[in-house]
Image (cartoon, helix red, strand yellow):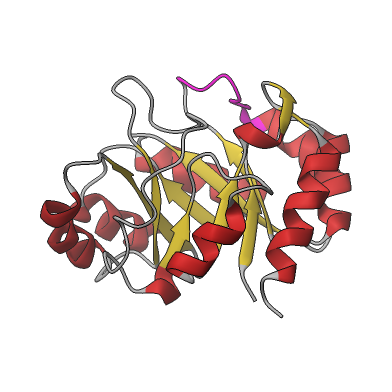
Amino acid sequence: MVWIKICGITSRADAEAISDMGADSLGFIFSTDSPRKVGLEKAKKVLKGARNISKTGVFVNEDIKKLVEYKNVLDLDFIQLSGDEGISYIEDLKNNLEDIKIIKSFRLRKDDFSDIKREIGNFLEFADYVLFDSYHKYKYGGTGKSIDWEGVRNLADPERLIISGGLDHENVSRALSLLDPFGVDASSRLEVSLGKKDLGKVRLFITVVRGSNK
């Protein structure tokens, strides 16, 4: 079954509704440059609406002490590193947090697929999963733009791959059929406004992904 993360959660109502829809993880963005950012206290309040669902914290180039604090306070299940964190950073993080799954995000340009394969392989010796997202010069994620699904095939072990980048109910089936990934991560195309989810689109997205498992 494909793992589903709905990211950019900012309200308790959305957390509760999406938990009930059967998503696998709620994503909370703690990056300082994101319009969907929530702080620690806000995340604690939002999580009161989450039931029977894992929690993913998304960070960009943060001090490891902050990640440890957020993980312990919020009982995070996954930490997603969406910045320029290197292998030594992941090693240090795992030394501080043994019971956490780490997702390393890669923002892919259209012209660097061949060059990046070895780098991804190196990271998979330390991270639990890699996430593919679209590249933007000034953003670390949440662009709403799709990547070249054909081009990224064979860059990573599908069982450890999470795909992102402009996913919605209209294009996720094609991405799944091409890449057969462990999971999918959707956010901006499932919104009515920044940080506010369109619950109808979220439900349809989950339904399409679950239907692909049959």
- Between 83 and 61, the one lying in front of the other is 83
**Residue 127: image location, x then y, percent:** 33, 64
**Viewer can see residue 23:** no
**Residue 21: image location, x then y, percent:** 85, 56
- Between 150 and 99, the one lying in front of the other is 150
Q: Which contiguous range is marked in magenta?
A: 33-40
**Viewer can see residue 125:** yes
Q: Is residue 66 left or right of residue 20?
A: left
Give residue 209's quadrant in the image. bottom right
> In what quadrant of the picture does the C terminus appear?
bottom right
Q: Is residue 79 above or below residue 15?
A: below
- Between 201 and 15, the one lying in front of the other is 201
At 38% across and 41% down in the image, what residue appears? 82
Give the mark count: 0
Q: Is residue 91 left or right of residue 21?
A: left
> In what quadrant of the picture does the N terminus appear?
bottom right
At 32% across and 64% down in the image, what residue appears? 153
Give residue 206's quadrant in the image. bottom right
Q: Is residue 149 left or right of residue 204?
A: left
Q: Is residue 135 magenta?
A: no
Q: Is residue 51 left or right of residue 35?
A: right
At 45% across and 66% down in the image, what residue appears? 178
Q: Main secondary structure of the magenta part?
A: loop
